[in-house]
Amino acid sequence: MIRRLLSVLHARNLEFLRDRSTLIFTLLLPVLLVIGMGFVFGGPERPLFKVGVLADHIDRQAAPFLRERYVEFIAVPDLREALRKVTHQQIDLLLDLRAPGRYWVNTDSPKGYIVEKLLLAAQPTARRQPVSGAALRYVDWLFPGILGMNMMFSCLFGVGYVVLRYRKSGFLKRLHATPLSAFEFLSAQVLSRLALILIVTTILYVGIGAIIGFHSAGSILLLGLLAILGALSMIALGLTIAARFSSEELVGGLLNVLTWPMMLLSGIWFSLEGSPRWVQWVANIFPLTHILNAARAVMLDGAGVVQIAPHLLFLAATALAFLAFGAWSFRWRID
Amino acid sequence: MAALQASATQRVEFDTQHRSAKRTVSTALLEVRELVKQYPATTAVAGVSFSVPPGICFGLLGPNGAGKTTIIEIMEGILPPTAGEVRYQGAPLGRRFREEAGILFQKTALQDFLTVRQSIALFRGLYARGLDVEEVIRLCALEKLAGRDSRKLSGGQQQRLLLAIALVNDPAVLFLDEPTTGLDPQARRNFWELVQSIRARNKTIILTTHYMEEAELLCDDILIMDRGRIVAQGPPRRLLHEHFAEVLLELPRADFPQAARALALKIIDTSDRVEITTDDLEGTLRTLLAAHVPLSNLRIRPPNLEDLFLELTGTELRP
């Protein structure tokens, strides 16, 4: 079984490496992404202070400090969530109106330092609760999203169309006349694409990371494991679509139907926190949501394997389920 | 080598059986029972049974649409039959059959960007046992092409590569579905020589063709098909002998007057000729002369499988 699998895997890798135009495109796209990210996020950020207020809504008359200019006040009802934002410097200071005079400030934040001076000028009696943590920029938050999106396209479209092309040309029919099983064939396709995706994602991680000056808070090895399981799950998903159909239009349409909700709902561009429950429920069906949630937990909050274990299990289970379903519904020839 | 000697022994045994014309179920390598293949619009195969003894070249003959490819693909285990079954060495087609069968489809695309050698190696990797890649390359005279991209081959070279792939597992049974269709005469002749050299290695070969010459040259036993049914079966010589008494007279249609159709002759019309079969050449010639049929363009020849097909089905074989 391993021998047959390796034979198909080797041939597929050779084919991919010799197909110059596809190879160049596969490598060029990440480079363009890196340059684009550098261009968009390389410039200076807008100076604006953001102060979180522990309240359901903000009454500007409640305190003199709330009437300061050039400060944006945001109502945050939940203390835990608000503290996380202070830690990541998403807000420069957190003010508690329900217990007057208490505030949290990130001691690592230069903006926090200035806003604190403003606050103390207005309310000299306020008690200080120090917090520390490096700034979380939007670009840091977006970074895992970009990696995940690139991975998704490569997984779904990369294998789907290859299998479809093999079926239409009759190459699959010829393979069917050998002892090769559908599971072996599909596994070889998955492994070939997995290797490619790991290489490209590593290039992207190092390249974009260097441009935006990103350092992961958590283990790189854990990220590697996450990338492997995540890519496996999405490649296998692409294979289930390509397992039996013979029409490019149909398969292309189905893949689009899969990718667009993932683009919008998996949290590539913006966080789904605060969106309706049903949206979050739907989002949790997609492998990409789990990849991004786990990646952000590791990269931004330094989560360990235990914290992201549910995501890893989900990805592993779906990878196996999709692959099994793909092998079961597989068609070697055009009916 | 040992395998070759073993099969040589088998060959002798088979020849004895074949000569005594006692082909029983137990000696058949492949057995086709009551095969039916029904498509929504047509019945491609309408209840066909036959068996193939080991060590022979077995030909399936018929015009396009006769059901040859459908039958051979069901025998290859590629196409599921609507009813009936195919047995290999007494058992239904299974893993063992796939390990031991070599297949050349009518049309096959290979993986892009692979060389001839790599394409063969890919398929070699799919079988537990088989020939060395270099040996297959030599066997199919592909030495000079081994490093070439498989898409940059001529029709004949492509067909030799596909044959090499079919031989890579040193198959006990080799299926060739119209292997020389579309090849130029030279390439066809080369391919025939290759098939004959494979036959000499005591493989069982199942061949479909609509070239009579090919069937007469290569096959020990043939099955003539038309519209999904068997029309005749047997060794080519015997079939010709049974259906034709000796000779065939050919005349251009223009030379054959309408009045002569009333004569007591066995006449078959083809597209541009009239063919008369007879076991009494002198008598027939006398009859024609008496009817003032011009004989300057007359050709007399022994009948071939093409005539047999015409005789059996009333239609011409070639499309």
Image (tube, coloured by chain):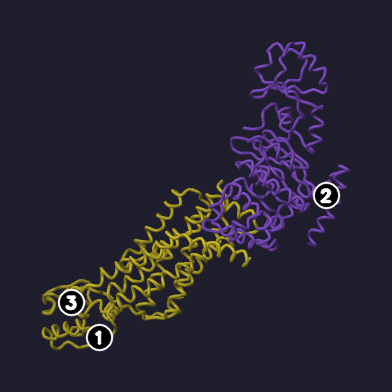
* Amino acid under disc 2: Thr
Say which residue label 2 marks: B27
Closer to the camera, B161 or A98?
B161
State the separation of the CA atoms marked 3 and 1. Answer: 15 Å
State the separation of the CA atoms marked 2 and 3. Answer: 92 Å
Classed neighbour count for the residue bearing mark 1: other residues with Cα under 10 Å, few (<14), some (14–19), many (≥20):
some
Relative to residue A231, is residue B200 depicted above or below? above
**Could you say whether the residue bearing mark 2 is in a helix, strand or loop?**
helix
Say which residue label 1 marks: A108
Specify the colour of chain B: purple
Relative to residue A109, is residue B21 depicted above or below? above
Closer to the camera, A272 or B218?
B218
Specify the colour of chain A: yellow
**Residue A328 relative to residue A224: left or right:** right
Query: Which residue is most to the front?
Result: B296
Query: In which quadrant will I find the N terminus of chain B?
Result: bottom right
Q: Residue at x 76, y 34 (%)?
A: B232
Classed neighbour count for the residue bearing mark 3: other residues with Cα under 10 Å, few (<14), some (14–19), many (≥20):
some
Q: Marks 2 and 3: which is nearer the front?
A: 2
Q: Residue at x 72, y 17 (%)?
A: B295
The quadrant where residue B63 appears: top right
**Could you say whether the residue bearing mark 3 is in a helix, strand or loop?**
strand
Q: Residue at x 36, y 81 (%)?
A: A217
Which disc is residue A49 wearing? 3
Residue B144 seen in render: yes
